[in-house]
Amino acid sequence: MTITTRILPETPDGHATPLLTVLVSEGGLPESLVALDRQVDGALRRLFQSRDFKGAVKESVVLYPNGPASRLQVVGLGKAGEITRDVIRRGAAIAGKTAQGLGVDRSSLFLVPEVAAVDIAEASQAMAEGLHAGSWRFSAMKKPPEDPKPDLASVALLFPEGKDDAERGRGIGEAIGAGHVFARGLQVLPGNVCTPTHLATTATDLAKRHGFTITVLDGNAIRAEGMGALLAVAQGSNEDPRFIILEHNGAGDDSAPIVLVGKGITFDTGGISIKPAPNMEDMKFDMSGAAAVLGTFETLGRLKPKVNVIGLVPSAENMPSSTAYKPGDVVKSHLGKTIEVINTDAEGRLILADALSYAHRFKPSCVIDTATLTGAVVIGLGHHAIGLMSNDADLVKEVLDAGQRAGERAWELPCWEEYHEQIKSDIADMKNVGGRSAGTITAGWFLREFVEGYTWAHLDIAGTAYTDRETAWLVKGPTGIGVRLFSEFVLGRQ
Ligand code: BES
Ligand code: MN
Ligand code: ZN
């Protein structure tokens, strides 16, 4: 469900549309809405004068005026001085969610210029992103209703000033929004549909549509490549694993690529170290890292930035069976290091290990992996921050900045040598779990064992990849986390 956005250099008064949303800050009726207020017989002024609406964050009212717009929505953004990109993005998401709920197929959005603390390009980008985020739904697996509502298909962004800047931001925001909803559409699919084969087919289709180079390794090719850790995880399932390599060549052959790696466990039962039944169904989201990488490629395909980017997706299903790998097994990774498997539920780091060592051949400028890696990151950071680990302070700053711009914030955890002790094994080069303490950090340390010759950052998205709570701007389910951060990161390196 992507939305076609366009910039209209118009003021909101006199604008005919099924739904006009105006984003406002706290305080009285802004000057830029006076003309519109006159057209709707003072309804806006009365709204601002009432105590019913203050313009605080998340506040939203829909009016049915006798004017050119058949519905007029007023959405609060909070205090004028505190309005960031993310506040605008969330305001636009509320507009998108409302439009989708009302069943209008087109609408218009106006950010009152009085609150513009961010520049016009950033604001229009955030608006396009937010509209996609808020309007996303998944109903493909339900019997269609008798009178289906249309999807929100096109939105006009009203910018009376700064048309060119607005247009530049809109183009970026629409492409990022499209990548974001692409990721969510993939995340939401159940494990019986979204298998490693399905991820590979999806990536192949992406490559065809956008002209990327693609290579897909199947089980036999993965064996030939020596990816013993990925194979160990896959061996308990009838689903054949896949290793996907997508390449966007935007800067010619001499420029070192950014490599993005995404964990693609299409279902994580835990294997022989099986997980408890409650909420196990959520483990269909264990391919959210893969979805973030593929979603980012949807964005890259639309924007074609002058940067080289490679996407790597190791994908398998983690199942218990008579052929499954077992606690105590020692497996040999692609890099050659051996791993003692203590817990078969710590499978994500195994498949990522082989991808990280595979990344080496591209002589990357940096590698960033993203993975629903540890339950411990939910204990440490809850559902509001991505756990970040890295071997390079400059890269940390670059990733944190990209996350801030994207509204997908990360928080750094220490990668100190002291934690390394916890994954030492008696009989192999390392073991795959480091005990109860600092579970996210020891998982990161495990990955670092496979990082050789490049700067690297790791994003643990286990707490942020999906949500069981509906908010004013997002429905329950997959969040598409990582697409906006990755896109900002890549565009920042153009
Ligand atoms: N996929 C899980 C992590 C996860 C937990 C994702 C909750 C989303 C929500 C991962 O493969 C896993 O099972 N990790 C174990 C590691 C442990 C065995 C060291 C965990 O976090 O419990
Ligand atoms: Mn697991
Ligand atoms: Zn997992």
Image (cartoon, rainbow, N blue to C red):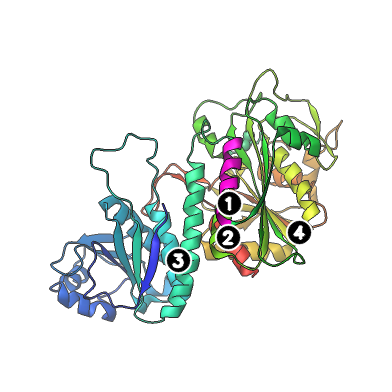
Closer to us: mark 3 or mark 1?
1
Q: Position of residue 340 (x, y in %)?
A: 79, 31
Closer to us: mark 3 or mark 2?
2
Tag 3 residue: 126
How many numbered tags mark residues here? Answer: 4
Task: State the mark number for residue 364.
Answer: 4
Closer to us: mark 1 or mark 2?
1
Is 326 included in the stretch rendered in magenta?
no
Q: CA distance from mark 3 to mark 2?
A: 17 Å
Residue furthest out toward the top = 322
Q: Neighbour class for label 2 at 10 Å: few (<14), some, many (≥20)?
A: many
Task: State the mark number for residue 208.
Answer: 1
Mark 3 or mark 4, which has the lower sequence index?
3
Mark 3 or mark 1, which has the lower sequence index?
3
Task: State the mark number for residue 300.
Answer: 2
Whether 451 is drawn above or below 45: the answer is above
| Residue at screen point 33% across, 60% down | 95
Q: Bounds of the magenta span?
A: 197-210
Q: CA distance from mark 2 to mark 4?
A: 18 Å
Q: Amino acid at mark 2?
A: Leu
Pointer 3 and pointer 2: residues touching (CB < 8 Å)? Answer: no
Is 208 included in the stretch rendered in magenta?
yes
Residue 291 appears in the picture as rendered: no
Q: Using residue 283 as the reference point, say whether residue 345 is left or right of it.
A: right
Element at label 2: helix
Q: Neighbour class for label 4 at 10 Å: few (<14), some, many (≥20)?
A: many
Q: CA distance from mark 3 to mark 1?
A: 29 Å
Q: Neighbour class for label 3 at 10 Å: few (<14), some, many (≥20)?
A: many
Q: Amino acid at mark 4?
A: Pro
